[in-house]
Structures are given as C-alpha cells and as structure tokens.
Amino acid sequence: MSAVLIDGKALSARKREEIKKKCEIFEQEYGRKICLAVVLVGNDPASEVYVRNKIRGCEATDIRSLSFTLPQTASQNDVEQLICALSADESVDGILVQLPLPKGLDEDRILNLIPPEKDVDGFHPVNVGKLLLGKETIVACTPMGVMTMLRDNDISVAGKNAVVIGRSNIVGKPMAMLLLRDHATVTICHSRTKNLKEICKNADILVAAIGKPEFVTADMVKDGAVVIDVGINRVNGKLKGDVDFDSVKEKASYITPVPGGVGPMTITTLLENTYLCGVRRERAKS
Ligand code: NDP
C-alpha cells in the first residue's frame, strides 16, 4: 500500500487565500489592516530566513507587517523595551519574537511580556493554560497546523490512538493537548520512554516531533496509520524529516512529506492566528 500524501503546500496556498479575504473584510469593517510585528534579535541565518518567510506570508495575505531587527549585542532591557512599546501600540495585533534568542537573554521573561491577546505564537502561559483547560485560545502554530491538515483530509481523531513523539512546549505538548481536545486517546513519548517501538506500533495517528532524521522507521508503524512528520533536519544540505519517508509511506494510509508538509502550514497558521488576534481585540472593544 502507498500512503496518500498530505500536501501542506497546496493546503497552505488555499488557506492563505481564505485568510486574505478575511483580512480584507476586517479592513472594510474596522478601517485598518491587521498588523503583525516581528522581532528578530541577532543574525542567526536560519532565523533570518524564517522571519523573511513570515513577512512574505503577511504580504500574501494583506496583513501589515512591521519588522524590527536588534543587534546580537542587544541587552535584555533593549528587547523588553521594544516588546513593551509594541504591547502598548493599539495598531499592532500580534507580536512575534523569533526564537532562539541570543545566549544571555531571558527568553521566558521576554515571551511572558507579550500580552496574551497579541501572542500569535501561543507560547504565553495564559494561552497554554487555556489550551489545557479546553478553552478557546491562540494555539502554537505547528500543532494547530497539523490539526488543520487532519481536518482537511477528513481524518477523524475521536477515539483513535494517537502517539506524539516529543514533549517540547512548542510542538509535542500542545500537539497532544489538541489531539486530546478532539477526543483521541493520547500517549506522549520522549527520550526516556521505554518500548517506544511497541507504543508507536499501536498508533492510529503517529506524530513525530523529535529532531532526529529518519528516526521513525517502517517497523515502528502500524499498517494504515496516519503519519505526521514535524521534523526538519538538515542532512548534507538537504531537508529530512523525522520519518523514514520511503519505507513508511508503504505502510501508512496518509503521510506528510518533508519539505512541503507541516512546514508551510506552520507559517500559514501564524497568519491565521494574527487574524484571530486582530478580530478578538476589536470585538473586545465593543
Ligand atoms: P525539541 O528538541 O525541543 O524536542 C524534541 C523532543 O524529542 C524532546 O521531547 C525529546 O525528549 C524527544 N526525543 C529526542 N530523542 C528521542 C528519542 N530517541 N526517542 C524519543 N524521543 C526523543 O524539538 P522541537 O519540539 O522544537 O522540534 C522537533 C522537530 O520539529 C525538530 O526537527 C524541529 O526542527 C521541528 N520543528 C518543525 C517545525 C515546522 O514548522 N515543521 C516547527 C517546530 C519544530 P526529551 O524531552 O526527553 O528530551
């Protein structure tokens, strides 16, 4: 059997058209554009690429973007002052601080300064707490993008065994919470998990968010499983996922490719989150 490919690039293009239309309606209704402020500290080349792609995404969806680049030597106070100014700026709907920050900066303190209603990344403890409580909130972009991919392919989650490999705050944990919210029976695995292969083999939906190229092999996958590959690993200049795509696609019913799977949906979900922050802020005023 060869799995159906979940095409994140195509879905992302469709979703961006929808977001653009919604942003145009927002502008007609409120007389201003949705606005995202992107903060980059330092000159990490990968971060520069991510920021550029996010700003391009804004351009494609009629979101106004403000880009702030602080030098590698920026102090904690420099970054905090910028975040405070953007927090107070009524025209800014979303604030994104590109991670990782240079060593020496207190990442938690900086992220916690972003008001929850402008937290487009869904990293603020208030938003994470709301997710845990099952309340409506802004959710981290990568796992939220995965849920959109599942829904778009009519893959039902309720009652399924879902296994998430990885427990990071930005991917693994929110992914597990979203699957649970949609009534899956969820197992979270990590580097101390025993019998990982056996647990994975029981998964109807298997999400790999490990950061190890081609870690998930066919012998870990149940026949007909839905396999979602979050991993982005650079191997000899090429992008590889956490899943051994060629062998696993012969067992899975659905699979995401790398590149062209979860990655494009992450940025598109950021744009959707920015739109949601704008709408909720305007509605909160009335
Ligand atoms: P982290 O390094 O923060 O987390 C990796 C997780 O994998 C940890 O929980 C770790 O366990 C677990 N792990 C590591 N080794 C093993 C092992 N041998 N067996 C089982 N579990 C293991 O990574 P992120 O969550 O930030 O990212 C994961 C991957 O997703 C990376 O490749 C990253 O580049 C990619 N990514 C992709 C995005 C996209 O847009 N497509 C967005 C964000 C990330 P423990 O907690 O015990 O250390």
Image (spheres, rainbow, N blue to C red):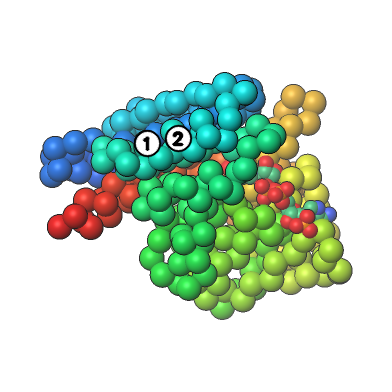
Res 95 quadrant in image: top left
Badge 2 vs badge 1, beta-carbon distance below 8 Å: yes
Vertical position of residue 103 compared to residue 144: above or below:
above
Q: Which amino acid does label 1 sit on?
A: Ala
Q: Could you tell me which residue is drawn at 48 percent across and 73 percent down?
A: 133
Q: What element carries label 2?
A: helix
Q: What element carries label 1?
A: helix
Q: Residue 81 carries which label?
A: 2
Q: Could you tell me which residue is drawn at 46 percent across and 61 percent down?
A: 126
Q: In front here: 174 or 93? A: 93
Name the residue beneath numbered marker 1.
85
Residue at the right extreme? 194
Left or right: 100 with respect to 86?
A: right
For the N terminus, the quadrant is bottom right
Mark 1 nearby-residue class (10 Å; few <14, some 14–19, many ≥20) = few
For the C terminus, the quadrant is bottom left
